[in-house]
Amino acid sequence: MLDIKTVFIINIILITILSFYMLVVYIKNSRNRAIQFITYFTVLFFFAFILFYLRNQIPDFLSIVIANTLFSIAIVSLYIAIKDSLQLDSKWHIRYWIPIVVFSVGFFIFTHLSFNFSSRIYIYCIFVIIYCIHFAWLFWIYKSKEFKLFDTLSSILFLLGVIVFSLVMVSSNIETLSTYYFSNTTFALYLPNIFYFMLNLWAVVLIKYRIKN
């Protein structure tokens, strides 16, 4: 079985390819908001993955706080892209910064003021679960007749994300995890990497099939 670090590297390679692809698509369709924010999502995700991978080689502020802050902005960017693809209000509202700031401050507190790996896992998982529930709800409630199958499968994908990150939280309570992520062998920690792999592939299908250039 591949170790977590290898699976993580596979995701980095995939997100690197996807980021370059999205930059090319964005240059050709710079006025398309869905494409614009999917590009933000992939590029920010890429930098978040790289900083996280460099843990113990660069300061914790960069590899933990900044990496996860970039991740949170990426998720909100995905939220806007999804709303635009469903022809809903996709403007960036000031209130979108609230979960990002709360998320970032939480990581700062439990990294530099009161080091607590479990608390960071909870913050991360709860953040992802909330957005996955919302994404699943959006695709289910606003699915179109033309893209009914894709929207239904998208809703199921994000519900799967809810299950994955719920299992990670449960696992963090049952087992003692190493504070260095890549040292862990717990199967539950493989699941987010598998989910992100599926999410990256889904983003490609979203661009090719669901979003109109």
Image (cartoon, rainbow, N blue to C red):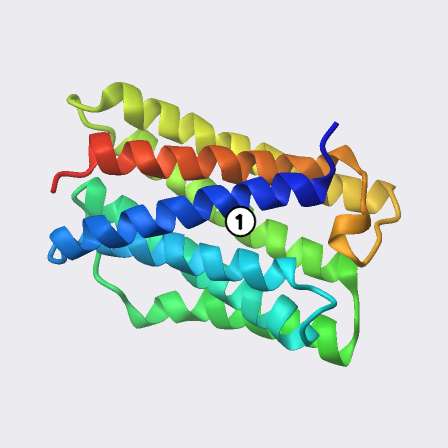
Identity, as a three-letter code, of the amino acid under mark 1: Val
- Considering only vertical position in the picture, is 212 above or below 34? above
Picture quadrant of residue 179: bottom right
- Image-based side of 88 in relation to 125, left or right: left
Residue 29 seen in the figure = no
Would you call the spot at circle 1 few (<14 residues within 10 Å), some (14-19), or many (20 or more)?
many
Residue 143 in percent (x, y) is at 24, 29
- Image-based side of 155 in relation to 147, left or right: right
The residue beneath circle 1 is 128
Residues 27 and 160: in front is 27
User: Residue pushed farthest right?
Assistant: 176
Q: The residue tagged with tag 1: helix, strand or loop?
A: helix
| Residue plotted at (46% across, 56% down) | 46
Of the 4 image quadrants, the one containing the N terminus is: top right
| Residue plotted at (63% across, 57% down) | 53
Number of labels in the image equals: 1
Residue 144 in percent (x, y) is at 19, 27
| Residue plotted at (81% across, 49% down) | 183
